[in-house]
Image (tube, rainbow, N blue to C red):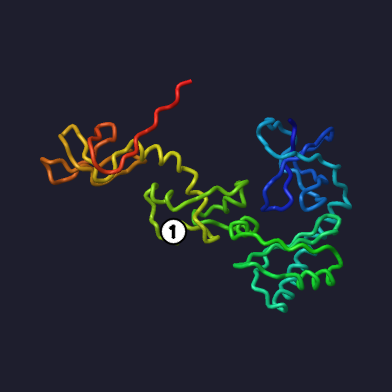
Amino acid sequence: MKVISVKFKESGRSYYFDPGSLVVETGDFVIVETARGVECGEVVRGCHDLPDTGFSREIKPVQRMADGMDIRRMRQNRTDERKAFAICEQRIAAHKLQMKLIDAEYTLDRNKLVFYFTADNRVDFRELVKDLASQFHTRIELRQIGVRDESKMLGGLGVCGQPFCCSRFLKNFQPVSIKMAKEQGLSLNPAKISGACGRLMCCLAYEQKSYEYLNSITPQVGSVVRTPDGEGTVTEVNVISGTLKVRCVESLTPKTYKRSECEYLRGGRRVPVKPDKED
């Protein structure tokens, strides 16, 4: 089916919409309905094909092309959001609530103002909502988000020097575990394997399947293997380069061998590769 990709914030993710009979090109602005309400967004990719199985949720249609008034209203909303953010921070301090304000968003028609925040525990913000409603005279919604969502919304640079993956291209957060760092031979120092959000870096999951496969076919440290120079014990492994350092019985100095030159005999940790299922 034909879809377009629409982005509502410069650092935000893009969403698919059905253009219908409209001729929409990259750089145009369109009016669409989202979970937050009616929004004006910029088209970051014009009409392109999306496989019918490529998206599980219903793709909503584009309501119409945005005109000059819509674009001016959207930009005015962005300016007013910064003012609303500052006011909300003041009211949070006045109510002495343990919460950190992250962002504020107006819908295009200004029927709703959404504030995003993080907090360590549940927060009773009923009085705050009443206070804000009297200030802005519109429907107020407060949404508590996680620390990973905070990094996604705010953006920034990771330890690699690149913009955060979550704010650049990741559509959904992948589960990441400390086991991945262990299998990849990384330092288990939390400061070295955690992102700016304080959670394990999303990029640990990118090569995990490759590491799982390479670990399964590579004798681990402590394994006894047969080399061209006789039997020996593995003292060091580099699964990426596929090399092993082996101390043979006849020599006290370890020697480096290719993985293909060594035959696993016993010991160590080695998970056998499951054979592919036959068709």
Residue type at mark 1: give it: Lys
Q: Quadrant of residue 266?
A: top left
Looking at the image, residue 112 sits to the left or right of residue 161; the answer is right
Label 1: element kind: helix
Q: Quadrant of residue 121?
A: bottom right
Viewer-closest of 252 and 129: 129
Measured as percent of width and height from the top left, residue 135 is found at 83, 72
Instruction: Report the residue that reaches farthest toward the top.
Output: 279
**Label tally:** 1
In the image, residue 125 sits, relative to residue 170, either above or below, namely below
How crowded pointer 1 is (Cα within 10 Å; few <14, some 14-19, many 20+) is rated as: few
Instruction: Report the residue that reaches farthest toward the left.
Output: 250
Looking at the image, residue 134 sits to the left or right of residue 235; the answer is right
Measured as percent of width and height from the top left, residue 193 is found at 45, 56
In the image, residue 255 sits, relative to residue 158, either above or below, namely above
Q: Residue at x 76, y 59 (%)?
A: 105
In the image, residue 202 sits, relative to residue 267, either above or below, namely below
Q: Residue at x 12, y 42 (%)?
A: 251
Q: Residue at x 37, y 33 (%)?
A: 273
What residue would you read off at disc 1? Answer: 192
Measured as percent of width and height from the top left, residue 45 is found at 71, 39
Measured as percent of width and height from the top left, residue 165 is found at 57, 50
Q: Quadrant of the N terminus?
A: top right
Looking at the image, residue 58 sits to the left or right of residue 231; the answer is right
